[in-house]
């Protein structure tokens, strides 16, 4: 089974967790987009849900496919968020933000009673950190913030390249108007300590460590869909 087929399979499996009447957080990325397409099929058959998208990109796709949408202002409490991830460990800790939507993804996940993560099995890791950690930062003083990230991570014994995310010759700009720094620390022995250290830096808006947010994970592999965590 190729990667696209695995994304479709896990997206279909996620539909079993969606019930009529739900207020649904809708993630960002290629796996989340496979879910949006599968969800649109159910909506066209009569499933009643309202979605709160985590990015302009997902909002656009949902709109094109006829999925009813609301904002988090309209619906500040959600039943379930379904989103992808760049890495997941056995404790359901995640790295997210490969698509640059981590801030809205985290706000929406935190506003949800449950977060269901969908991914292919290659995203399951023993230790987080092989995927560069995305850190969303304010554009003001980005060099000072980068230095502060270097110092804070060095205190935790972490080092590696810390780069501003670019699109061609221009910085990548998030939906919130911020920048992304991708930090290739390598394996992160204590994600909670790194999270706290990053949150203490004024220029850091948010980071891609999702700790204690995911309630369950569906992973598609050659043998089918495996579930980690509660139903
Ligand atoms: O966090 C994300 C976007 O900010 C995505 O969920 C993550 O990058 C996974 O994407 P994909 O499903 O395309 O592998």
Image: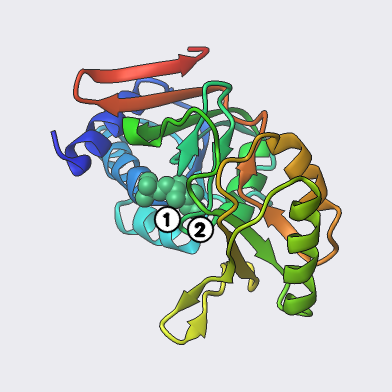
User: Relative to 231, does residue 109 appear above or below in the rendering?
Assistant: below
Residue 185: percent from left, percent from top: 60, 52
Residue 159: percent from left, percent from top: 66, 55
Question: Residue at (71%, 77%) from the top-left corner?
Answer: 139
Looking at the rendering, in which quadrant would you find the N terminus? top left
Q: Secondary structure at mark 1?
A: helix
Left or right of residue 28: residue 205 = right
The residue lying furthest to the left in this view is: 1
Give whichever of 82, 196 is nearer the camera: 196
Residue 91: percent from left, percent from top: 58, 22
Q: Residues within 10 Å of mark 1 (few under 14, many from 20)?
A: many
Question: Residue at (32%, 37%) from the top-left corner?
Answer: 39
Judging from the image, the colouring scheme is rainbow
The residue that mark 2 highlights is 55
User: Label 1 to label 2, Cα distance in Å?
Assistant: 5 Å
Q: Is mark 2 within 8 Å of ligand 1?
A: yes
The residue that mark 1 highlights is 58
Left or right of residue 154: residue 46 = left
User: Relative to 214, does residue 72 appear above or below in the rendering?
Assistant: below
Residue 58: percent from left, percent from top: 42, 55
Give whichever of 91, 205 is nearer the camera: 91
User: Relative to 215, does residue 57 appear above or below in the rendering?
Assistant: below
- Residue 155 got which mark? none
Give whichever of 96, 215 is nearer the camera: 96
The residue lying furthest to the top in this view is: 231
Q: Do tag 1 and tag 2 residues touch (Cβ < 8 Å)? A: yes
Q: Is mark 1 within 8 Å of ligand 1?
A: no
Question: Residue at (44%, 57%) from the top-left corner?
Answer: 59
Residue 67 appearing in the image: no
């Amino acid at each position: 089974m190729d990667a696209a087929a695995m994304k479709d399979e896990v997206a279909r499996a996620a539909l079993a967790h969606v019930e009529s009447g739900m207020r649904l957080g809708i993630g960002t990325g290629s796996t989340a987009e496979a879910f949006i397409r599968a969800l649109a099929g159910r909506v066209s058959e009569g499933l009643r849900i309202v979605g709160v998208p985590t990015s302009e990109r997902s909002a656009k796709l949902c709109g094109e496919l006829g999925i009813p949408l609301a904002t988090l202002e309209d619906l500040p409490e959600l039943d379930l968020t379904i989103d992808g991830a760049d890495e997941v460990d056995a404790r359901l800790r995640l790295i997210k933000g490969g698509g640059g939507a981590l801030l809205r993804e985290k706000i929406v996940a935190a506003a949800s009673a449950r977060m269901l993560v969908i991914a292919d099995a290659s995203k399951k890791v023993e230790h987080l950190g092989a995927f560069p950690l995305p850190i969303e930062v304010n554009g003001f003083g980005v060099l000072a913030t980068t230095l502060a990230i270097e110092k804070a991570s060095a205190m935790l014994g972490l080092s590696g390249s810390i780069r501003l995310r670019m699109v061609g010759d221009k910085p990548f700009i998030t939906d919130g108007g911020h920048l992304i720094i991708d930090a290739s620390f390598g394996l992160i022995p204590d994600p909670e300590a790194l999270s706290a250290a990053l949150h203490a830096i004024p220029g850091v808006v948010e980071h891609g460590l999702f700790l204690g947010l995911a309630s369950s994970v569906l992973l598609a592999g050659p043998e089918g869909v495996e579930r980690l965590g509660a139903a």
